[in-house]
Image: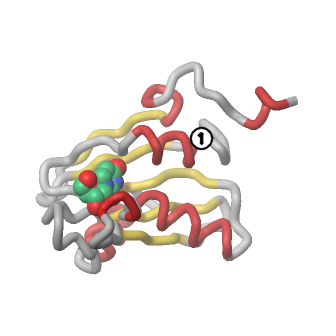
Amino acid sequence: MDYQSLIAKAMEARKQAYAPYSDFAVGAALLGKSGRVYTGCNVENASYGLSTCAERVAVFKAVSEGERDFVAIAVVTEKGVTPCGACRQVLMEFGGDIQVIVADAAGEYRVFALRELLPDAFTPKNLR
Ligand code: THU
């Protein structure tokens, strides 16, 4: 799947964002090695700290459906910002060799390696 198609899926997912408190809508589309795509949007809560990012929704959907190996994630926000630290860590759990495609609402995008966004990460191998 090409970057544009993955971004298009993240844009679709972004329309489902439940963000009445921040008014900051985020969409994500995570491409598994199987070829399946798992989408996510941010889901906020009146108890603000319970809000969940779009990227983590996508990862948890994938893992709960049996997929743990990923190729890339597209993340769409209005201005094209990189994922928060918590989401970088959650993505890193399943391997650093993924591409993080960060797009804005117009579809302009930048591509990062996850390792570049979270250098010298704490990973499962550190527990062995
Ligand atoms: N958010 C995400 O969904 N992903 C990120 O990487 C950064 C932040 C959400 C959480 C919250 O609903 C809103 O954006 C503002 O922080």
Q: Quadrant of residue 10?
A: bottom left
| Mark 1 neighbour class, 10 Å CA radius: few under 14, some 14 to 19, many 20 or more | many
Q: Please give left or right for residue 4 compared with residue 105 in the image.
A: right
Residue 90, percent from left and from top: 56, 47
At a point 73% along the width and 71% down the height, the residue shown is: 66
Residue 82, percent from left and from top: 31, 41
Cβ of mark 1 under 8 A from ligand 1: no
At a point 26% along the width and 69% down the height, the residue shown is: 11
Q: Residue furthest front?
A: 47
Q: Please give left or right for residue 17 compared with residue 64 in the image.
A: left
Name the residue that disc number 1 marks.
Answer: 92
Q: Quadrant of ligand 1?
A: bottom left
Q: Amino acid at mark 1?
A: Met
Specify whether residue 76 is in view: no
Colouring = secondary structure
Q: Return the residue nearer the eye: 23 or 78.
A: 23
Q: Return the residue nearer the eye: 64 or 7.
A: 64
Q: Secondary structure at mark 1?
A: helix
Count up the numbered dots. 1
